Amino acid sequence: MRTALDELIQVTDQILDGDLQKEEALPTLTEDGRRADGKAINPGDVFRTATDRETTPYPKYSRKRTTRPEEARLNQWLIDNYLAEAEARNDDFNATIAKGLDAKNFSVADGEGANLYIFGKPQGLSAEAAPQKEEVKQENDNSDIDRGRSTKLNVGDTFTLSGVDYELDDVSSGRVSAFDVDSGAMLEWDSYADFENETGKAINFDDRHAMILGWEARNQPNNQRRNLISKKTLSTTSTDDIMAMFDGTYSEEANAEEEKAKAAGAKALANAAKYGVRGIDEITKGLVDLFGGSGSVNMFFGGLNRETYDKAKVHFEAGFASFKEAGKSLKEFAAWVRDSFGAGARGYFQAWVMERKGEEIVFEDDKANTPKTLLEALQANADKITNNTKLKAYVAEFNGIKTGEVTAEQMKAAQEAFELIQVVRARQVVGQGMDQRETFEKLLELYQSQPNLDVRSSTSMENQAYSTPAPIAYLASQLAGIESTTRVYEPTAGNGMLLIGTKNTESVANELDPQRLERLKSLPFKTSNHDATNWKPQELFPSVIMNPPFGKLRDDDGTLAPVKVDGFKVGSIDHLIAARGA
């Protein structure tokens, strides 16, 4: 009887003898959707993507005359593989664009962009241009190793400077930041070169960042820097962006925002085309600049701003005129504004309608809206604060000092205030009543647009106070069965993120830190100020949720000190808090 091992031996022999030929490589597609090898595309064909993945089989279609349903199927095939490729690359930005495409309203530009992304070279250095890694020589004195790590640092690695241990924090904006492991104090360098000159450490950029962050090319003469640009990048990146890369002034974040704006504009134009309205490119761009797209979480605090309204009014008037010219009503124009620009445009659209009806519009007095607290200042600019560099700039502006004079304590206070703002915004998202997936994706978008809340103080380190990301907090509340009416107890509430799923005002948020306790009082819950390791609430709650401190229970001299709860021996802080709260 022939076994699987016999077959394996036979195949191995065939390979060794050269009798078994390699399987023919799968074809790829060009930007305009044709096979790169010039052959005809047949239903069931499978193609090789840029990351060496296989597409799903090509759908059936008529060679003579493709029908609308067939076109939609072909478009959907391309969209599905675009999304799969983006997810395989962990590329959230392109995945979001793919999810927003409509197979029934699919432009030539949509198809070209999807094909180029799926089958072109991935963003980054070309293989022939990629710099070779230097061999790391092992020396007996370990002079190239710092605390067990290579001198080429990744974010999160530690290094020593002037006898102080620092952790590398952020290298994504052209600047470098690190914080004191013990005190949480932040250090910043204006460029990668400044960081290397002072610390003697190089930054180990991964392939995704190599194109953008490698422009300093510290050991290469200027005339060789252009060679780092791959053919793929030359075909998909503007000349201005490429030269900004060359000059070291390119901002990945600003470019991503520009791409988001382009996608929002394209969607708005597609929405207008559904109503038969065309030629409103400038109107659309103006409204995108003001309000973002339909998926935007732009929020306007402090009432209507007259300057913003004056700009929006011009575009509303011109847009409505275009809709009327196409035979469409105010109702259809309002639906287009809503679907294209989201909740951020609502108040200003309402003001425009009120003015057309002769009703009075109330604008907030700019002086009256001058922020009196740092929380108000950050709240007014929350959408613009996407990283710690921007957060530090607002802290400096509010305090009337230079960014270099901002202390670690001020940054910690700012991050705590910003987390409270995110809690409020997250509660608004959950309160919209979307399904679980939509809610999670909105919260993920909110989380990905915020600074890293990573500055630590002596108090936060002692209390092990760490922030829970909004999407994780939502998942936890769902797993705990928390609904809007559920009465919940949170023994280590922090700034209240784990309570975003409930609106029950009888819920209790307990917090040991007095400053966090004061911030919690702005949320619609009862509050208490107890040490959760030795206090048990007098009442029972349907749900208890927490992200407690972790670690072993110890006495004042550091000796392990487990305690008994209801006859059970408990030796961990988190277990003890859970037992007290149950």
Image: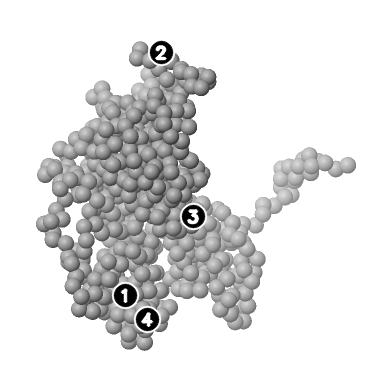
For label 1, the residue is 281
Choose the circle earlier in sequence order: 3 or 1: 1
Measured in 3D between alpha carbons, the distance from the residue under mark 3 to the one under mark 1, in whole angstroms, is: 32 Å
Choose the circle earlier in sequence order: 4 or 2: 4
Q: Which mark is residue 277?
A: 4
Identify the element where label 4 is drawn: loop
Front tag of 3 and 1: 3
Measured in 3D between alpha carbons, the distance from the residue under mark 4 to the one under mark 1, in whole angstroms, is: 11 Å
- Give coordinates of residue 403: x percent, y percent: 17, 42
Residue at horizontal 19 percent and vertical 47 percent from the top: 394
Measured in 3D between alpha carbons, the distance from the residue under mark 4 to the one under mark 2, in whole angstroms, is: 75 Å
For label 3, the residue is 437
Measured in 3D between alpha carbons, the distance from the residue under mark 1 to the one under mark 2, in whole angstroms, is: 70 Å
For label 2, the residue is 559
Comparing 314 with 66, the one in front is: 314
Instruction: Classify 10 Å Cα crowding around label 1: few (below 14), some (14-19), many (20 and above).
Output: few
Instruction: Classify 10 Å Cα crowding around label 2: few (below 14), some (14-19), many (20 and above).
Output: few
The residue under label 2 is which amino acid type? Thr
